[in-house]
Amino acid sequence: MPDSASEPYDLAVIGAGHAGLAGAVAASERGLSVALLDASGQLGGQFYRHPAPALGAVRPQALHHDWAAFDGLRRRLEKSDVGQFLGHHVWSVVRESGEQWAVHAVTGADGGDERPVRVRARALLLATGAYERHLPFPGWTVPGVVGAGGAQAMLKSGLVLPGRRIVVAGSGPLLLAVASSLTAAGARVPAVVEASGYLGYARRPHVLAVNPRKLAEAAVHASALLRHRVRLRTRSAVTEVHGTDRVEAVTVARVDPRWRPVPGTGRRIACDALAVGHGLVPQIDLATSLGCATRRAPDATTSLVLDDLQQTSVPGVWAAGETGGIGGAQLAGVEGELAGLAVAARLHGKPFLTEHGRARTLRRRRDRMRAFADAMAAAHTPGPGWSEWLTDDTDVCRCEEVTAGRIREAVTDFGARDARTAKLLTRAGMGWCQGRVCGTAVACLAARGDDGTVPPSVERRPLAVPVPLGALASLDEPDEPDEPDG
Amino acid sequence: MQCEILLPVPTSNSSDVIVVGAGMVGAACAYYAARAGLSVTVVDRGAVAGGTTGAGEGNLLVSDKEPGPELELALLSARLWQELTASLPPQIEYEAKGGLVVASDAAGMEALRDFATGQHKAGVMAEEIPCDRLGDLEPHLAPTLAGGFHYPQDAQVQPALAAAHLLRASGARIRLGEEVTHLLTQADGDLTGVRTATGTLHAPQVVNAAGAWGGELARRAGLDLPVLPRRGFVLVTEPLPRMVRHKVYAADYVADVASGSAALQTSAVVEGTAAGPVLIGASRERVGFDRTLSAEVLRRLAAQATTLFPVLAGVRAIRTYAGFRPYLPDHLPAIGRDPRMPGLLHACGHEGAGIGLAPATGLLIAQLLTGQQPAVDVGPFSPGRFTSVS
């Protein structure tokens, strides 16, 4: 905690997942005053999502590997004097002066008793994680279609299954993990449908060889699936969902290397739910609003450009975990700790702290895991032919009910050329989710050339979450930095 | 081996006029020029409505303008918008909703009355609304207001859709994603076309409708036109059932619009939209092309909007964005021939009124292009007024 209420914290960490926790603990243990903010009421982020105590889960760790790592961080956090701001929805971060940042949040966004909170700090660590990448297809709005990550989250937090007979489809390493969790929880999984092959990994054998832990993980999932007789269909995709009030079946078709469906290969698989995921998208709204430079990651998502010590292109702002490119919880922990250490070194004026010992180990580990993440990301990048799944009447933007046909028309007839102008002309992406669900699809459809590749586009969302006007209007009232909970 | 230098193959394209800028003003220039019988090419470095047009609220206002050349332009535009609405599809969301300007006290009301009296002589319709009748027009307005004036000629369109449909209706050739790098002139100084990154376009006349970037385009012609960006933020709420029926704003707005100060000014303009969200403008500050969020701007806009409509306090803002009004030092647009370069016309610098003023601007430009007498005196809008060149 800062010495007095008017003093800024040394560091504000946004996001209490693996990266944020590791960063907060590392910085605090090196003598910094740290504020840790998260929208959720519990620590752990998406990966270490766990049931509320009221559900009485005896072994929440059963659905997690690496629970021990989380548990260890949590204990160190409890021993530290890190100010915890849970249930705080951060809507913006602004620079107040050269050396001071203001983190603006609202509390109680779910309960109605919303109140603005401002936390000031000398440095920022953005550990805001990721959200699911969705690619629409005919029938994706039928009840029973859930995100693969969403299915996992439901299971982890509420011990709920989305159905009894669940097809898992899309692309990416998450599919195997999800299928394995679903079967472990008692669901039948008639097929895992993966649009890519796994040959992509084989093209980078050296990367695999130095990441044995990842191979072991894959082996665990694979054997679990084998045990439950789950069929893995690679180079295939769910191109249509059948059913109106509820999923009744899906059509699975072979796809070519560009992800174009191969005519005549469609096959129906009966199921009552579909968990579909195409990997994750870094959640970088706060960073892009600050002007942080971005890069196109190997999986065609937009992530932050970071230096060797996790600092963004904006001095004083660090980032860790998925914000720098999708890489998973273990990498996030390593990057978070490294960032925490780097911030401490900077604020203490001891840059040499980042050159030896622990920092060096972390950097080496980070580089190795990043290389693996990049190889994996490249292997699961959506093929440019995916948009051929879409019929003109497929809804692309669910919030505003905008079809693929209308977006195509905005491009061909009315001069839209990117996601922003497609949005202006069709309202796609203007609804509640602010384009987080349809953003990838709209950007692909709006891109010139119609080859379906995901164009590099940085969407700006200066409001990272909705904010009541009343809370905005009373912004200046809390003149003193707020006290953390408890 | 020596490298062979490959020059891009020049693609030759000729038309009577090239309009630079595919925003609302460019679309209107293209539309009226084509209607006057000219062949038109529109070129833009980005997409249709990708600049200030896509960042505005679509205000078609007469209520905020004092008698003078801009009001004359606005009244002509208001008539033209009604005509356009008859021929364009309903997707442009034209709505003759009317404006309501409110005052918080008797002194403010007195000022509004004076202002409206002057406007009335210039042809603006305005009706005084005493405080006990404000609720008939806007049931959710704060009950403490002193009264207001209703301006039935104020209207609204969805600006991006209006520009896109008008551009399409023009039948002009449209070249998007092509940035104009040079203006081409003959030895005698006459304009012959423009060069873009991908080729050369030929035309004896070029219209600068590049909005906030109009000054930059002029610079590329070696000319000075002092267009500066004046930043504004808009707050967009979650979709709501119709709560706000008119364009509602407080009396201070008029003073802010006319101010030349670089400092931040905010005066909430609140309105509902056909799609459901309520839009809240309008802040003004001169900070260059900086999109960085200003918490202070949002605080002021939200505070002013919830003062007018207390019911909005519990409503969520789901989006905010910044736009850049093309601002000229005397707050009037540049419309007309550039005396320094034969063949070059300017149609930019409309500040926050470009959507409203676009049809009249387009009509005047078309009249100038074809040698007709302009419908209103363009003298006050002369692009040469900022230089000593005669």
Image (cartoon, coloured by chain):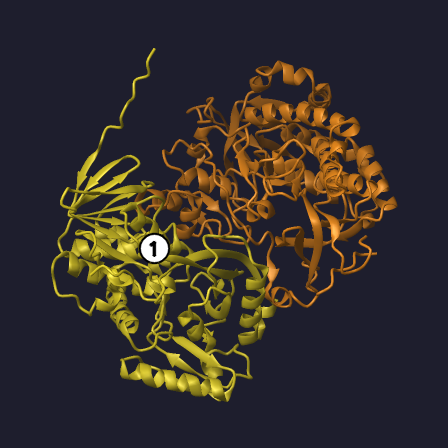
Q: Chain of mark 1?
A: B
Q: Give the residue at x 58% y 31%.
A: A169
Q: Is residue B112 left or right of residue A238?
A: left
Pick the residue in front: A108 or B148: B148
Pick the residue in front: B106 or A396: B106
Count of labels in the image: 1
Percent x, y for residue A162?
A: 66, 41
Query: Looking at the image, is A172 positioned above or below residue A462?
Result: above
Amino acid under disc 1 = Gly
Q: Is residue A159 visible?
A: no
Q: Image quadrant of residue A293? A: top right
Q: Is residue A52 left or right of residue B253?
A: right
- Reading the image, the residue beneath label 1 is B211
Q: Which chain is yellow?
A: B
Q: Residue furthest front?
A: B388
Q: Which chain is orange?
A: A
Percent x, y for residue A399?
A: 51, 51
Q: Quadrant of the N terminus of chain B?
A: top left
Query: Looking at the image, is A225 positioned above or below residue B70?
Result: above
Q: Residue furthest right?
A: A79
Mark 1 Cα shell of 10 Å, populated few (<14), some (14-19), many (≥20) = many
Percent x, y for residue A54?
A: 82, 50
